[in-house]
Image (cartoon, rainbow, N blue to C red):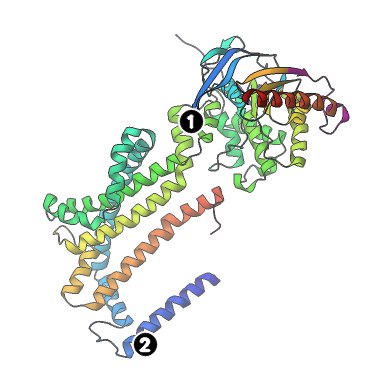
Amino acid sequence: MKRFLLAAAFFAVLVLLWDAAFRAKIWSPVLLPSPWQVATYLKGVAVDGTLAKATLITMRRLLLGYFIGLVVGLPLGLLTARWKLFRDTIGTMALGLQTLPSVCWVPLALLWFGQAEAAMLFVVVMGTLWSVIIATETGVRNVPPIYPRAALTMGSKRLHIWLTVILPAALPFIVSGMKQGWAFAWRSLMAAEIFVTILTGFGLGQLLHYGRELNAMEQVIGIMVVIIVIGLLADKIFFSPIEKFLHRRWGTSQA
Amino acid sequence: MHRAVRRSTAKEELQPIAPSKLAIEEVSKTFQSASGTVLALDRVSLNVAEGEFVCLVGASGCGKTTLLNIIAGLEKPDSGSVLADGKPVIGPGRERLVMFQEPALFPWLTVFGNVLFPLKLKPNLTHKDRRDVAKYYLELVGLSRFERANIHELSGGMKQRVSLARALAPNPRVLLMDEPFAALDALTREQLYGDIQEIWKARRKTIVFVTHNVREAACLGDRVLLFAPHPGRIKEEFTVKLPRPRDINSVDLAAHATRITKALKDLGRADDAATK
């Protein structure tokens, strides 16, 4: 409770500082709207359903792309960890492509898929896939060999060892890879939505983009706040509990 | 063909099982290293009787762990064979469980989950039976209170106790122990010497125990086999006929240990002379 109050007080102070800067008229109100203008805008789009609709569209793209990235990336990561052939080929490719900022996929996706959902999806998958592959590979290769050896003596065989020993043993790495993949997917989707207008749905990135076109700074900042809040919630609701569990079980660090 | 599947119960599962007889015949093993081919084991032969407690002693790198791994089926010999009850060992299996120097417990499972792990691999047991068996062995090693604990919350000695419970749980015929107490403090070790002798008596296992601690070997073994390095081979054999349970600090034991230590030292000198 005390921690929550402290955090709340911190953010309240931030908003007050922002408000003070607005009142001091250091910048034109066109460039820096007041917190209340932003709040009013958010209330407006929340009431008329624009915000919910845009959030839904964005989340659908994100989750679908992320899910595909995981489903493809996990097995590929296992393959690269297990066989040299895959490590030298897919592993090297993943390593190279992971260094490519995912926004760089946007021009290619546009030319290949046109202004369509497929382009968005492609960019998100490219953002997720490589870090999931690499994290899974790293995780598996860091499993102490004594674990599978011990399992072998207890009568565990190939597939059983992979499922009940190597995968769980690699879990801390895999989860941190999933988290990184999530962050990359989120970033690349926002970049794609800002650059690409598509007719099948307006996401948060597009709202942000039109905020700029209309010179509506309260919209720009408002949507940025929404994006930040979604990122925070994803972390607190999804990743945080998993990481806490891992820390408790493995005894790595006490959060 | 129809065959009735017979479920064994927890009670049956907990009955002591007949220990194995091991026959190691002319086992050789070489390794490739940076400095060339190393002969880790040179035609080693050894018979272990049912329910016998045999200790392998020697300097590190003399091949005793390699021999243990070959008996376990984790490694294949270049030549020679290992027979357990007359049947050749072709791979690892739960008849011959290994207790490693590091506890090798799975950190993603609780203490209870770890002991349950080998039992889940045993067919024909109900879920409840498996849990009963796991509980029995945790009780046996005195860790019932910690079944919900995470592995990292245990001390080194407790970890090895869990490891022992996990190795005993599927009721193996042979227990292979690779310096299981080497990383523990002296006090914990002494307790475990008592425990292991008691459990060995109660559960009737054939035990092959690898150590570099001569006193430990004299305390635990019916027979102590002295390993010589370069190439790895069994050099001498000592029979320890002392009543059990043995106390590591007893004077009678010290006499045996001194005898073995002297042989070990002579070996070391001979080896030094040979390599010069």
> Is residue A52 shown in magenta?
no
**Picture quadrant where residue B164 is located:** top right
Q: CA distance from mark 2 to mark 1?
A: 71 Å
- Which is nearer the eye, B216 or A148? B216
Residue B170 appears in view: no
Q: Amino acid at mark 2?
A: Ala
- What residue is shown with label 1? B34
Please report, as a chain letter, where disc 1 is located. Answer: B
Residue displayed at 29% across by 73% down? A222
Q: Chain of mark 2?
A: A
Vertical position of residue B67 compared to residue A236: above or below? above
Using the image, determine if residue B254 lies above or below residue B81.
below
Name above or below for residue A160 compared with residue A248: above
Q: Which residues are magenta?
A: B237-253
**Residue B264 visible, this orientation:** yes
Viewer-nearest of labels 2 and 1? Answer: 1
Measuring 55% from the left and 72% from the top, which residue is drawn there? A2
Identify the residue under disc 2: A20
Looking at this rendering, what residue extends furthest in the right direction?
Answer: B251
